[in-house]
Image (tube, helix red, strand yellow):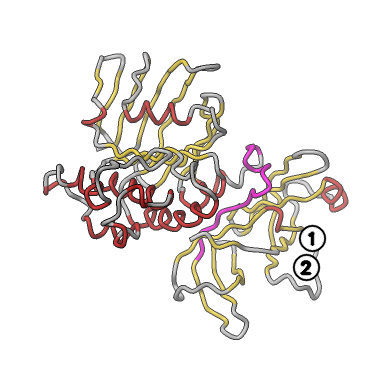
Amino acid sequence: MNSGIHFHFSLPLDGFDLEAEAEIPGRGVTALFGRSGSGKTSLLRCIAGLERPSTAYLRFNGRLWHDSESGLFVPPQQRGIGYVFQEGVLFPHLRVRENLMFGFKRTPREMQVESLQRVMDLLGLNDLLNRAPSQLSGGEKQRVAIGRALLNNPRLLLMDEPLASLDRGHKKEIIPYLECLHRSTNIPIIYVTHDPEELVRVADHLVLIEAGRLTAQGALNEMMARVDLPISRDYDAGAIISARILEHDQDFHLTLVGFDGGELTISAIDLPVGSDIRIRIHARDVSLALEPPGPTSILNILPARVMKMQAHGRGRMVIRLDIGGVPVLARITRKSQHRLGLEPGSKVYAQIKGVALLA
């Protein structure tokens, strides 16, 4: 059976038409990223079957759900889709346990992939079971809404900006649960967001949308290191790297991690040696030199090669580097680029001033 999600939708919207065609992975987390009003939610509703565009084609992991040419349309309730909205929409007259069980107890036992206890453990819901929705914080409501969607045993989980209505504190509370969900479930997820921080914490694959058009897509680590995309102009732009913990330095509270491009010394991580992690290197934290620097407070200096350059804004440059086959971004001034004589192919030393742990 063919894997992957292949879709093509044409739908008139206010101000522009949604004209979206793509084939995305049928596993992991695909983030649909774009500004508010770019058509993200409309595309999600087309996938869910809540919109019926005049032109539509949707095949999910070998199952044809919508084909306007032949007249085929599988109703939303028959697609096996879990949908999490921007605000945790719960049944107000039911307590948390009853909200969670609403879909679960209607699912035949042979189709129950997720157990109630596993979902409660995954999302930290054990202490909330006897509460009414009115007694929950915004973050708690969203965790219950996600749990209820999982217990419906969906083939596909759609999440429409699930953190958009939360303040910064509640976002920090729920993001670790989303990371855990990302690592712990085999259900493919399409995650809509316009927040770069959410994007890098939960996604494997990235699709960019602008005014109803899909402008680019690809693996998250590759997309985040492309200098030709608007996302590389953000202040928080940076590369996402998969790494593994090699050893801990207890004396100096540091951890050595290895990746395809070499080794990095970072702040101590409370995980065992051998653990796989994801790290983020912000473009603003990478400076460049033509020669190995002398004594310096910077712990991480790696040889690199300039691959691409793009002018961004007044007097600024974003440089894509190759470090042992791993793409990394550096943001420098145009004057620095001119003074160093940098061009594609130049050999440099990347001085990495900071590394952030993602998961």
Residue 299 % position (x, y): 69, 72
Amino acid under label 2?
Answer: Pro
Left or right: where 336 falls relative to 255: right
Q: Amino acid at mark 1?
A: Ala
Mark 2 crowdedness (10 Å alpha carbons): few <14, some 14-19, many ≥20: some
Residue 289: mark in rendering: 1
Query: Does residue 69 sit above or below 49 in this rendering?
Result: above
Q: Quadrant of residue 157?
A: top left
- The residue that appears at 35% across and 29% down in the rendered structure is 47
Q: Secondary structure at mark 2?
A: loop
Rendered view: 345 above or below 6: below
- Secondary structure under tag 1 reads strand
Q: Quadrant of residue 298?
A: bottom right
Question: Are circles 2 and 1 on residues that touch, CB within 8 Å?
Answer: yes
Whether 34 is among the magenta residues is: no
Give the residues drawn in magenta, as a range.
228-243
* 135 is higher (above) or lower (below) than 90: below
Residue 292 shows which numbered tag?
2
